[in-house]
Amino acid sequence: LDRNEMIGVVRGLVGAGVLITIRFIQSKIRDSDHHDLSVEEKDDSQKDSDSRNKSDEMRSSSTNWESDRRALLLSIGVVMSIEFVEWMFTQLRTRKRKTSLISASDLESTPRDIVIITTACIPWMTGTSVNALMRALFLSMRGHSVTLMVPFINADDQKLVYGDAHNVFKCESEQEVVVREWILSHLDQLFDTDESFALESPPISIVWYSAAYVPEFGSIFALGDVLDSLPSTHPRDVCILEEPEHLSWYHTGRMFTDEFEYVIGIVHTNYLAYAAEDGPAGRLKALVLFGLNQWVCRAHCHRVIKLSNAVQPLPYAVTSNVHGVRGHFLRIGRRRELEKCEFSKGVYFLGKMLWSKGYKELFELMKFYYSSKKSALKIDLYGGGPDLEPVRSYIQAHQEVFAQTYLHGRAMDHANEYLHEYRVFVNPSTSDVVCTATAEALAMGKIVVLREHPSNVFFKQFPNTKMFTTAEHFCVQIDRAMDTVPNPLTPQDRYMLSWAAATDRLYLAARAFPYRNSMDNLDILSGSFYRAVARFIVPKKFRVRQDSKKTIQDSSQADTLDQNLVEEPILIDAYVNTNAEPKPIANASKDQTELASNAGAKRELASAAK
């Protein structure tokens, strides 16, 4: 017999022995009870002997049944305890325990192989698609080999997510062409420099995994194990999980911490805030989600980075804003400063048309402004989304308060020239983790009026930020902002807003705790237990099949684009040195290379959904 068969035999013998022992003790107790009953029967009168015997038989039968039931439950409990203990030791013995997390967390010293897994992809212009792509580009500029793993959804889901403005992608290669074309068309907007870049291909590899859109969550989830799409020959060095809790809720495949030497989770979204507003049971859902997020982050991450303290406490977490703004916004601000352009417009708000994105809070503040100032606040609102018509109806129902409110009702790129003339950007939202639009407004040299909230702590360091705590304070700050000329951004301010600084902050935040060089037993067991439970409760189409094979790409289909974006790695002073001047970006290479995913290099990839 092999080792596993021997363990099974021993386990069965132990269970059988426990059961036999319990039954033996039970029989001895039953014989003793019968002996006592027979002695009592001899002392009884003959008159009621029949009725007493009948009563004794019923009592004896009931006692036997209770004894049998207790013995059975006890036997099951003992066997299950033995099984559970054996399962724990098996997990601790077979799971891959990394023992050098401190050295593995150093992303700065040497080039690394980095896999970034995210939950959205262009043309869906959401934070987890754009920010993950920007992070991949800037890490590759530092000399790292970067692979970006993005979801591919079917035609029906594409219509729901991407809208009718985009054609349906028949395969992954078609969508990859769109992604790379978007990068090339925005390449000159990525960097804070006026130099022109003659680059044909960004040095990142793109791998697709099969996924499905879940309208109830408004999110995309992987079908099966996302790691099945990564070629088996690909190095498993560093993994960055964009939204680790989102990626792990339905994940029943291999553990990320087993596959990679070091796993970093970057938390983008305040899911608890959204859950708390979801109907009467919202608070209960938020409470359950609080524990669930802690569970999966502990199991799947060596290090968790929170963009701000607006999100819940998480294991092994540090707070650092590792996001930046595109250099195009910084160039807009610099150009207006050099040309001494004055702002000709007043206040505006830009955000997706959802009540939870700050519109509810903004309208309450505008009501107070009207009641205290006896005049309506003049403001322009930009954004499109599901709550557009309810917002429009609300404004029309309160015409006095919103007499000078202009609802444009369409989404607009913040870099659009039409928005350059606004002086003040207001954002009272408390559901954001870090608002990208706020950072973009600061980069363009505008004044921002923000609520005192953990999500806005990063912006307090800039001179053009005005914080408010109450409705009265809001009225004071908004009037003051309209009468103030924005301060010019210093080189250090521009650097702190850039993606170059965000990458430096990522290097520092990714460092493991000095006292934690390996995962402890609780982390390993919690991950294994969650995976075992999730295989029963996760919807069937998202589970990992035992006979599943690689679904999208194999090692022969995964191309690695190793063109260098710059002649040498970018070296920028650490962001903690506030007196340091940012070093210039190295000159871009002028060599023309072919786009890896144009018509001549298209790859026909098999989709698991098909």
Image (cartoon, rainbow, N blue to C red):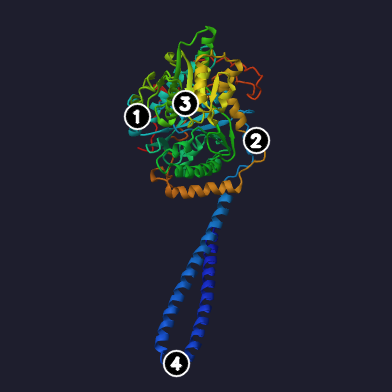
Position above or below: 495 against 431:
above
Residue highlighted by disc 4: 45
Closest to the observer: 66 or 245? 66
Q: Residue at x 54, y 24 (%)?
A: 467
- Residue 307 visible to an observer of this rendering: no
Q: Residues within 10 Å of mark 2 (few under 14, many from 20)?
A: few
Q: Secondary structure at mark 3?
A: helix
Q: Nearer the viewer, mark 2 or mark 4?
A: 4
| Labels 4 & 1 near each other (Cβ < 8 A) | no
Q: Secondary structure at mark 4?
A: loop
Tell me the kind of residue under disc 2: Ser
Q: In the image, residue 253 lies at what x, y percent?
A: 47, 44
Residue highlighted by disc 2: 103
Quarter of the C terminus within the rendering: top left
For marks 1 and 3 on the same chain, the one whose residue lies earlier in the sequence: 3
For marks 2 and 4 on the same chain, the one whose residue lies earlier in the sequence: 4
In the rendered structure, find residue 130 and report the number of the disc placed on it.
3
Closest to the observer: 125 or 365? 365
Closest to the observer: 16 or 68? 68
